[in-house]
Image (cartoon, grey):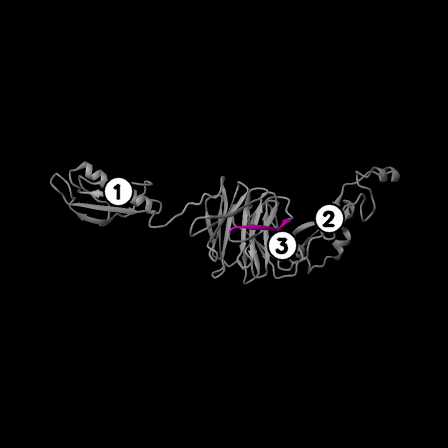
Amino acid sequence: MGGKPSGQWAQKVIMNSMKSIWWLVTSGFPQGSVLKPKLFDVSINNLDDGTEGALHQFADDPKLGEQLICGWEGHSSEGFNKCLSAYFPAHQSRVMMILFVLEMEWVLSTGQDKHFTWHCSESGQRLGGYRTNAGACGLQFDVETRHVFVGDHSGQVTILKLEQESCSLVTTFKGHTGGVTALCWDPVQRVLFSGSSDHSIIMWDIGGRKGTAIELQGHNDKVQSLSYAHHTRQLISCGADGGIVVWNMDVERQETPEWLDSDSCQKCDQPFFWNFKQMWDSKKIGLRQHHCRKCGKAVCGKCSSKRSSIPLMGFEFEVRVCDSCHESITDEERAPTATFHDSKHNIVHVHFDATRGWLLTSGTDKVIKVGVKRFL
């Protein structure tokens, strides 16, 4: 039967106020009716989020008709368009991230209730949980070692070792000044990428076992999502500013140095403004402290008046460097190692299709964009 049933005695059950094609289920005569039987048709309409049912040319028996309508309504509503569903009471607050591990039949999740939990997808049983320092919205899993990486709003990345019904803390990474907003795991090179609201990305070299952390600075707003292309060894990062940055991770990058502490400029020995003793002895006014991004030394503004990009250290934009380091940076070292693109909307999530070279982004403007041009 095509189209909506018609007739004087047609009755229907409508859910979600959606209209579509009606399909004939069965026809016949109602049994048990004390009145004169009439031919009836039962038609239903399967929708994505519900079901619409109708009863056509039914007998003049309102009681029997009501029972049959209610029966179809209940059965169709529970069917959810023939999709099975399960309910996991995992969190007491908003769920931030869900990850399904097919090899283990596990469902991993994090929430704003500061808990990480994992369930068996077959039985629905809760296998275990772990309380984090803050609400977590970054989640990645390594199938080979059963390690899970959880990034939270405090800027910390927690690494846990999962067993069937227990977990143990391996270590924690602290490098971001803002909350961790995205994680991406490369199981081949065994490196973890973390994006943060401090606009930075950190590459944690876990496989090298040296504790190396490489910073990537290329966004003007918080990093929202990360994706990694294994075949070209390129990292794709998207930010709330709408920027898409493609990083070449096949180059030998350098770890950013730690900032040194000093009471005076390590270039000209001028005292900083809190060094009262040296200011009194030298009869000079203290200066403001800055740091060179290349060597990490504490310098004054006069000794760090120049700017330069340092792509191999992750600084794609020009940053403060001391005069001596500025002279040592060659044009080859200033060559960019990343490309920049504008998505023209505030990105929330990104997915890269390596087979087609397509990039899909979803934004806060409720728009999903598919970039058909090859980014890599």
Q: Secondary structure at mark 2?
A: loop
Q: Which residues are magenta?
A: 165-173
Depth check, mark 1 against mark 2: the one in front is 1
N-terminal of the pair, mark 1 or mark 3, is: 1
Quadrant assignment for the C terminus: bottom right
Mark 3, Cα crowd under 10 Å, few <14 / some 14-19 / many 20+, is many
Q: CA distance from mark 2 to mark 3?
A: 19 Å
Residue at x 24%, y 45% (from the top left corner) = 4
Q: Position of residue 220 (x, y in %)?
A: 60, 46
Q: Which residue bears the numbered disc 1?
A: 71
Q: Is residue 162 left or right of residue 266?
A: left
Compare residues 349 and 288 and report the one nearer the observer: 349
Marking on residue 259:
2
Q: CA distance from mark 1 to mark 2?
A: 71 Å
Query: In the rendered structure, are the residues bearing label 1 and label 2 in contact, judged by CB atoms less than 8 Å apart?
Result: no
Q: CA distance from mark 1 to mark 3?
A: 57 Å
Q: Position of residue 11 (x, y in %)?
A: 22, 40
Q: Secondary structure at mark 1?
A: helix
Residue at x 61%, y 62% (from the top left corner) = 250
Q: Amino acid at mark 3?
A: Trp
Marking on residue 204:
3
